[in-house]
Image (cartoon, helix red, strand yellow):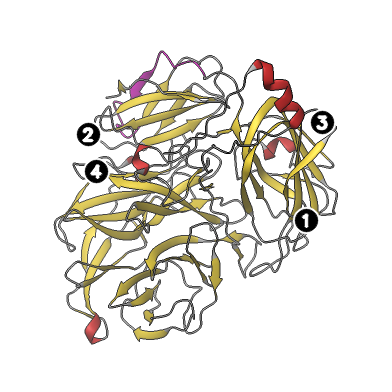
Amino acid sequence: MILLKYTFMTGIMSCLVAALSTAPSAAAPTRQQTFCNPMDLPYCFREDDPVRREAADPTLTVFHGEYWLFPSKSEGYWHSKDFIHWEMVIPTGLPIDDYAPDVAEINGKLYWTACQAGIYTTDDPLKGVWTKASDEGNRGDPALFVDDDKRVYLYSGCTNGGPISVVELDPANGFKELMTYKPLMSQDIAHHGAEIMAEPDVNPPYDEHDSWIEGSFMTKHDGKYYLQYACPGTQFKSYSDGVYVGNSPTGPFTYCSYSPFSSKPTGFVAGAGHSSTFQDLGRRYWHIVTMTISVRQMFERRLGVFPTWFEPDGQMVCNTYFGDYPQYVPGVVKDPSKGNGPGWMLLTLNKSAQASSTLDNHPVSMAFDENIRTWWSAKTGNPGEWLQVDLGKVCRVDAAQVNFADEGAQQHGHLKDGYGYVLQVSLDGNKWTAIVDRSKAPRDAPHDYVQLDHPVMARYAKLTNTHSPAEALFSVSGLRLFGSGLGHAPGAVTGIDVARDSDDQRQATISWNAAPNADGYVVRYGVAKDRLFSNYQVYGNTTLHIHTLNVGVPYFFSVDSFNDTAVTQGKAVVGG
């Protein structure tokens, strides 16, 4: 990992402040490219009401040296050579608006399928002309898998309770079924806490009806077959992926006790279910997931990407730790399991703010509360509406993410333009310098992430509207600045107590003492002291109740503290 290092000495601080920015020296290492979840794509507005954007159920593959991304309900698909700049293809001959697409490469061609859609193929996805290859595969949430011996399997299932099933197909004979569909797994809500249909912060009583089992995907690694599935429902922040493992593509499969392996129940944007696992151009694993907003409508969703790997004993890991903070794009870090971020922390959490105007029930605080489900809105979309935040002290700013909320938008389909704005920073609130200027060429970037060419010093930031598309009011769910507060790391957490519910082992309550100088906490847990891969991010509390544990599985827990400068990791304790 490459980390940029900065030295701030008392004798030169005044010079840096006066100059506003810290220009890199000639010998400074190149700033490697980062991105920030949710992925910044021109998400499509749905054709039905209520007006909202949607993309979900993503599958991503590498074909002819490029990344090809196929999500649900996007009127097309995207491709990229660098994972930063994405271009859309609007295809012909493909029922592109069907849910849950999946693609696989077979004999040099791409094959596409989706819910109840049949199978289609092309040898040139850039040209975008597809032809139907088969009427087979008309199943819910289908997932194609090509084994090393070139045999082809189709996994499917999207029901309240399951099952996920498999069938072998014959691609040389119109993808005819070579076996009857074989059920592989179904929900087991009595033992798998992640399958409870409830938000992560809901204490009992919660709804105990069947979990929604869906979104299967198959990955083969080191001779083992990893059958992934999503639960409990796409509208929940607890939307996650569990995994079963077997020695054959048709099973039998055994539930992995560390499930869910892909989970992000908290943070600015939550959810990490109905996903696909892919390898980047350097053959490193990643997991691209569905993330939830689900405010205007249940299927209001976005996409996210996280580093993934396999432990030496085969445990599958998807790293969502601070998963909506800046991280390096695929290909930068040789081994993302050892860390995949520049260490830039959030500077804007719950900071004092003001605005040019405020719509009822959408106060300025909602742009800084780390919750994509709430947003500030101005009363109009007129040029000149603005939002300003006081960081409380001079900080180093390395990157910005502006998340637009589309309040009042009147749009179906893709936008032809986007939000125009200027983001300025200041040391004193009087003299302003623009660090991002989208005023001259607005583009549709609803989660516009900008990594600065070099860091700047600032105490204040101001976002000014120059154009709001689709009759939308100027509205922001998160104005997020990342960098360093230039302070001290928070104190370590002490007094951790884990109370596993003796009557319902799926539940536990974790409590701890407040740490000095902490803005928040991350509760990490897992099946071994050195494998605390699951996490909950906590603000404003020193107690957390969770219901995502597996019955009969012992866990270890730790609590990290963090602030705008650093993270201090806690020590693991036994949690029963």
Crowding at dot 1, Cα within 10 Å, few <14 / some 14-19 / many 20+, comes out as some
Q: Main secondary structure of the magenta part?
A: loop
- Which residue is identified by label 1? 439
SS at mark 4 in the image: loop
Alpha-carbon span between mark 1 and mark 4: 48 Å
Residue type marked 2:
Gly
Q: Nearer the viewer, mark 3 or mark 2?
A: 3
- Which residue is identified by label 4? 315
* Res 73 seen here: yes
Where does the magenta region start and end?
490-507
Q: Nearer the viewer, mark 1 or mark 4?
A: 1
* Res 204 seen here: no
Alpha-carbon span between mark 3 and mark 1: 21 Å
In this picture, residue 108 sits left or right of residue 428: left
Q: Nearer the viewer, mark 4 or mark 3?
A: 3
- Which residue is identified by label 3? 429
In the rendered structure, which disc, 4 or 3, sits on the residue that comes first in sequence?
Answer: 4
